[in-house]
Image (cartoon, rainbow, N blue to C red):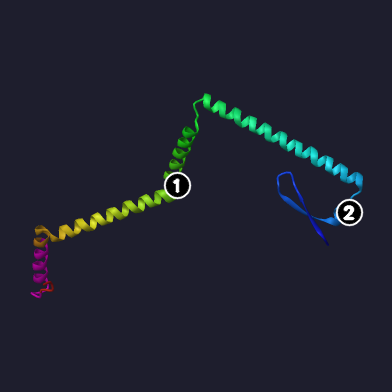
Amino acid sequence: MPHARTETSVGTYESHSTSELEDLTEPEQRELKTKLTKLEAEIVTLRHVLAAKERRCGELKRKLGLTALVGLRQNLSKSWLDVQVSNTYVKQKTSAALSTMGTLICRKLGGVKKSATFRSFEGLMGTIKSKVSGGKRAWP
């Protein structure tokens, strides 16, 4: 079955069977073309109306002091706030905090283990253990 392509009002093409065109009578084709012309005219009118409304919107924003930069800043602030309260961000912050705390605790315990007080305590524990175990010292 042969196919033809017809350009639509928005610049795209629709594929249709040429036999469909052949099945239409001359008055039906004229009627469809008239409807198409009216529809395309409506589209143009709507585009003009939309452009006018966008201009009016811009004027009102300028009068209110809402420039594009202010709007962008507000959007960025809101987005950053949304990120901060998101579960993923909170989990990452918690994970980072716990990791940092764990590292600090390890360093502190390492420092305590090297301190003279801990070594003295360790020696005392070794002495007590050797007395309890009957003179056998397990620690070097």
Disc 2 secondary structure class: helix
Disc 1 marks which residue? 86
Amino acid found under the numbered disc labelled 2? Glu
- Residue occupying image coordinates x 52% and y 24%: 63
Q: Is residue 99 left or right of residue 58?
A: left
In the figure, residue 80 lies in which quadrant?
Answer: top left
- Residue occupying image coordinates x 72% and y 38%: 43
Disc 2 marks which residue? 22
Q: In this view, does 7 lie to the left or right of 68?
A: right
In the figure, residue 128 lies in which quadrant?
Answer: bottom left
Q: Residue 129 appears at what percent x and percent y?
A: 12, 69
Give yes or no for contact between labels 1 and 2 (Cβ–Cβ under 8 Å): no
Name the magenta segment's main secondary structure.
Answer: helix
User: Quick one: label 1 or label 2, which is nearer the N terminus?
Assistant: 2
Kindly report the distance in space between the C-alpha atoms of the residues bearing marks 1 and 2.
Answer: 61 Å
Q: Is residue 45 left or right of residue 61?
A: right
Where are the magenta residues, as a range? 121-136
Question: Can you say which quadrant of the picture contains the C terminus?
Answer: bottom left
Residue 107 in the image: above or below residue 27? below
- Residue occupying image coordinates x 28% and y 53%: 101
Disc 1 secondary structure class: loop
Nearest the viewer among 101 and 30 is 30
Nearest the viewer among 60 and 99 is 60
- Crowding near pointer 2: few (<14 within 10 Å), some, many (20+)? few
Instruction: Report if residue 95 lies within the magenta region.
Output: no
Q: Residue 108 appears at what percent x and percent y?
A: 19, 55
* Front tag of 1 and 2: 2
- Residue occupying image coordinates x 91% and y 48%: 25
- Crowding near pointer 1: few (<14 within 10 Å), some, many (20+)? few
